Image: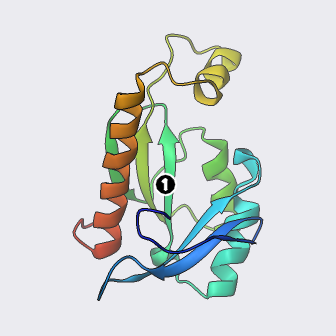
Amino acid sequence: MRRWDLGKPKDKFSGRFVEGRIGVAQPRVAVLQPQTFMNDSGRAVGPARGALKLDLDRVLVVHDEIDLPFGDIRPRMGGGLAGHNGLKSIKAALGSPDFARVRIGVGRPDSTDPELVSAHVLGKWRESKADVDALVDDAARAVEAVVRGDIEL
């Protein structure tokens, strides 16, 4: 939101919401950061989509992905949910898994134990601050490219 200088977000749709243009003569966007638990993200996304009257192909979900190595960023249209409970919630709220995504690789721990996987996803970064900052910047550039239509999904 700060990157595009969209202004101060408002509490709306069970999240932090702001809309505006991503730059002069650039597309309008609405950005929603759900304030629900991650597993209940659809409770924010569904009502926002309805209120904004967005076609499903205008929805872009940015999310972590443990099945990608740390630092990999992969935009795509639709696809499976890979056990991601936040995506399951969004699919249920939108009625379809056919929404655009920017998947941000956070890596997978060396275990399949659900408690260790959960601790990995919810815990502090193991990577350096510089590596995390670079990941955030790369992800933001990927989102901008999708929004501008520079990346075909």
Q: Quadrant of the C terminus?
A: bottom left
Residue 70 visible in this rendered orientation of the protein: no
Q: Residues within 10 Å of mark 1 (few under 14, many from 20)?
A: some
Image position, residue 9 (x, y; %):
64, 70
Q: Residue at x 49, y 74 (%)?
A: 6
Q: Residue at x 32, y 37 (%)?
A: 72
Pick the residue in front: 26 or 67: 26
Pick the residue in front: 56 or 31: 31
Q: Residue at x 35, y 30 (%)?
A: 130
49 versus 61 height, above or below: below
Pick the residue in front: 90 or 107: 107
Residue at mark 1? 62
Occupied quadrant, residue 83: top right
Work out which residue is located at the far top of the displayed protein and give it: 110
Image position, residue 20 (x, y; %):
49, 82
Q: Secondary structure at mark 1?
A: strand
Residue type indicated by callout 1: Val
17 versus 62 height, above or below: below
- Number of numbered discs visible in the structure rendering: 1
Q: Residue at x 28, y 65 (%)?
A: 145
51 versus 40 height, above or below: below
Image position, residue 101 (x, y; %):
44, 57
129 versus 65 height, above or below: above
- In the image, 1: left or right of 74? right
